[in-house]
Image: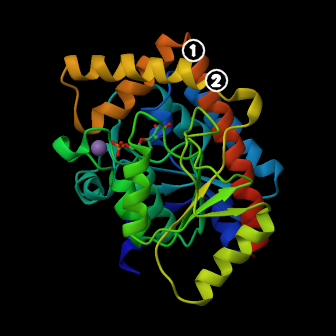
């Protein structure tokens, strides 16, 4: 394949793929742009070890010196955690970043593309991007949604943050034909909270059932992604009133400072962390770990 010259798969991930063992893809934007140092590094390591404990192999993905790296070593994870000039790559950025040999963390959309190039079928993240509030004026709709429409990777996330318009995000996913599965829930989770007031299309209560659904989709030749919505564990779920208030303050500040485009999500995450005295970061870390576990469990049942 021609893309091979741009991809380097780590020996551990490569062996797992060859031996048909479960591999879970992990993104790097959450490391470089979603959390501060050193929490980002510690989380990246913890998430990988959670995947291993569940019997799968973690494949954290990033673009380093213009090479798509599938499976990173601890030095590379540390570099992505500490370095200030890491770009944030979604689909449209990949070719420029590779041709110019730059460094980038991959968002959900770019991670899906890279995972799919490496034949990895399941991917765990915190929350996906979605339709932003006021998108009717800003047109700000995350490229994660269009990627879910076309790239054949199942994404485990804790829904979408209420910094976004959850209702419009769901409508968009429906239009794009993306199956949305609630894991042990009838509600579409809102990242920091288990409830959002919006329902999911389908509820499946076991990793087995989800793996079975994914296999069925594969056999039918239905392309595109699947969104598996795993609510944050109860004990780390936020009080809805408190988080909504923090989100609203952060959104107003972003508006005042005229923050737009790819800077908005990192800005809001960092503001919300400051407003909640670090509590939102703790929730974020816990839900990523929980998503990694579920992805590993599903991955193990897809083989
Ligand atoms: N959700 C988080 N933390 C993050 C992201 C989402 O809790 O860091 C990242 C993901 O990589 C997602 C990206 O793909 O933000 C979406 O960015 P945008 O809204 O600019 O499309
Ligand atoms: Mn955007």
Asked if the residue at tag 2 contacts the one at tag 1, i.e. Cβ–Cβ closer than 8 Å, the answer is: yes
Q: Is 86 drawn above or below residue 25 in the view shown?
A: above
* Coloring applied to the structure: rainbow
Image coordinates of residue 56 in percent, x first then y, are 75, 58
Image coordinates of residue 230 in percent, x first then y, are 66, 49
Mark number, residue 278: 1
Image coordinates of residue 39 in percent, x first then y, are 59, 23
Q: Let me know if residue 169 appears in the view.
A: yes
Q: In this view, does 154 lie to the left or right of 250?
A: right
Q: Which of 271 and 2 is in front in this view?
A: 271
Q: Let me know if residue 83 appears in the view.
A: no
Q: Which of 258 and 61 is in front in this view?
A: 258
Q: Is 282 drawn above or below residue 177 in the view shown?
A: above
Q: Which structural element holds mark 1? A: loop
* Residue receiving disc 2: 282
Residue displayed at 72% across by 65% down: 299
Mark number, residue 99: none
Alpha carbon of mark 1 to alpha carbon of mark 2: how far? 7 Å
Residue displayed at 38% across by 69% down: 176
* The quadrant where residue 183 appears: bottom right
Residue that sits furthest to the bottom in the current view: 220
Image quarter in which the C terminus is found = bottom right
Q: Which of 251 and 208 is in front in this view?
A: 251
Q: Dividing the image into four quarters, tell me where ligand 1 lies.
A: top left
Q: Which structural element holds mark 2? A: helix
Residue displayed at 57% across by 14% down: 278
Q: Is 160 drawn above or below residue 79 in the view shown?
A: below
């Amino acid at each position: 394949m021609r893309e091979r010259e741009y991809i380097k798969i780590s020996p551990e991930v490569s062996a797992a793929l060859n031996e048909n063992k479960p591999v879970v893809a992990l993104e790097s934007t959450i490391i470089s742009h979603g959390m501060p140092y050193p929490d980002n590094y510690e989380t990246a390591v913890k998430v990988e070890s959670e995947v291993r404990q569940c019997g799968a192999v973690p494949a954290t993905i990033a673009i380093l010196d213009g090479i798509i790296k599938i499976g990173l070593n601890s030095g590379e994870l540390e570099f992505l955690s500490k370095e200030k000039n890491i770009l944030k790559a979604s689909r449209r950025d990949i070719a420029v970043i590779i041709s110019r040999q730059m460094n980038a963390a991959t968002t959900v959309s770019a991670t899906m593309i890279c995972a799919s190039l490496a034949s990895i079928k399941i991917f765990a993240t915190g929350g996906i991007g979605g339709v932003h509030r006021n998108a009717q004026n800003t047109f700000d709709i995350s490229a994660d949604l269009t990627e879910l429409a076309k790239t054949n990777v199942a994404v485990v996330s804790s829904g979408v943050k209420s910094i976004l318009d959850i209702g419009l995000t769901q409508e968009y996913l429906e239009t794009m034909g993306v199956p949305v599965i609630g894991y042990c829930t009838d509600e579409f989770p809102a990242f920091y909270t288990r409830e959002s007031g919006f329902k999911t299309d389908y509820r499946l209560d076991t990793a087995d059932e989800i793996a079975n659904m994914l296999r069925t989709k594969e056999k039918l030749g239905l392309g595109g992604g699947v969104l598996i919505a795993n609510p944050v564990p109860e004990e780390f779920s936020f009080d809805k009133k408190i988080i909504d208030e923090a989100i609203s303050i952060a959104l107003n500040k972003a508006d005042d400072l005229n923050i737009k485009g790819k800077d908005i999500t990192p800005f809001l995450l960092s503001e919300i962390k400051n407003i909640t005295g670090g509590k939102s970061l703790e929730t974020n870390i816990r839900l990523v770990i929980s998503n990694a576990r579920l992805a590993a469990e599903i991955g193990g049942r897809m083989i």
